[in-house]
Image (tube, rainbow, N blue to C red):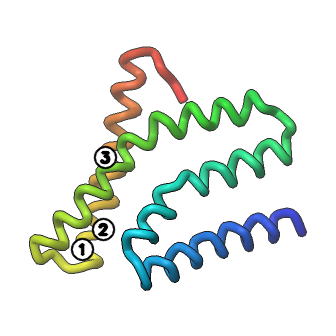
Amino acid sequence: MLQYAIKVAITAITVVAISEIAKRSSTLGAIIASLPLTSLLAFLWLYGETGDAGKVAELARGIFWYVLPSLVLFVAFPLLVSQGVGFWASLAISCALTFAAYLAMIAVLSRFGITL
């Protein structure tokens, strides 16, 4: 249970730090947020709990493929906001579009025999 609490605390601190930095500099906040910190933390937690480097490599391969559809969010959200769509509506639409992009990526990968 302590290990779980430590994981949650470190992850929360990372997110809070990024949002605080972004208040002062959106550029620096964006650079830090774009780093694969969440993935690195997941690699560390997974390897620490399982000792299985193969499992971590499998996770890394999956992340690689799913990064591509996640980019839809970062294109759609600012575009919608700049068109006058409200924050919450833009966020909801962007999330829905991103979800659709994930489903499309899964379908495309399966056509090529790639399962994650």
Q: Is residue 63 left or right of residue 80?
A: right
What is the distance, in whole Å, between disc 1 and disc 2 at their CAs? 5 Å
Residue 1 in view: no
Mark 2, other Cα within 10 Å: few <14 / some 14–19 / many ≥20: few
What is the distance, in whole Å, between disc 2 and disc 3 at their CAs? 12 Å
| x, y percent for residue 64 | 49, 36
What is the distance, in whole Å, between disc 1 and disc 3 at their CAs? 16 Å
| x, y percent for residue 111 | 36, 18
The circle drawn on residue 10 is none
Q: Secondary structure at mark 1?
A: helix
Residue 52 in view: yes
Do the residues bearing badges 1 and 2 touch, measured as CB atoms within 8 Å? yes
Q: Quadrant of the N terminus?
A: bottom right
Q: Residue at x 67, y 67 (%)?
A: 11
Do the residues bearing badges 1 and 3 touch, measured as CB atoms within 8 Å? no
Q: Secondary structure at mark 2?
A: helix
Q: Which residue is the site of mark 2? A: 92
Q: Which residue is the site of mark 3? A: 100
**What amino acid type should be assigned to the residue bearing mark 3?**
Ala
Q: Is residue 5 left or right of residue 8?
A: right
Q: Residue at x 32, y 36 (%)?
A: 104
Q: Which residue is the site of mark 1? A: 89
Of pointers 1 and 3, the one earlier in the residue sequence? 1
| x, y percent for residue 102 | 38, 42
Q: Is residue 94 left or right of residue 48?
A: left
Of pointers 2 and 3, the one earlier in the residue sequence? 2
Q: Is residue 76 left or right of residue 34?
A: left
Q: Secondary structure at mark 3?
A: helix
Residue extending farthest right: 2
**What amino acid type should be assigned to the residue bearing mark 2?**
Ala
Residue 115 lies, with reference to residue 97, above or below; the image says: above
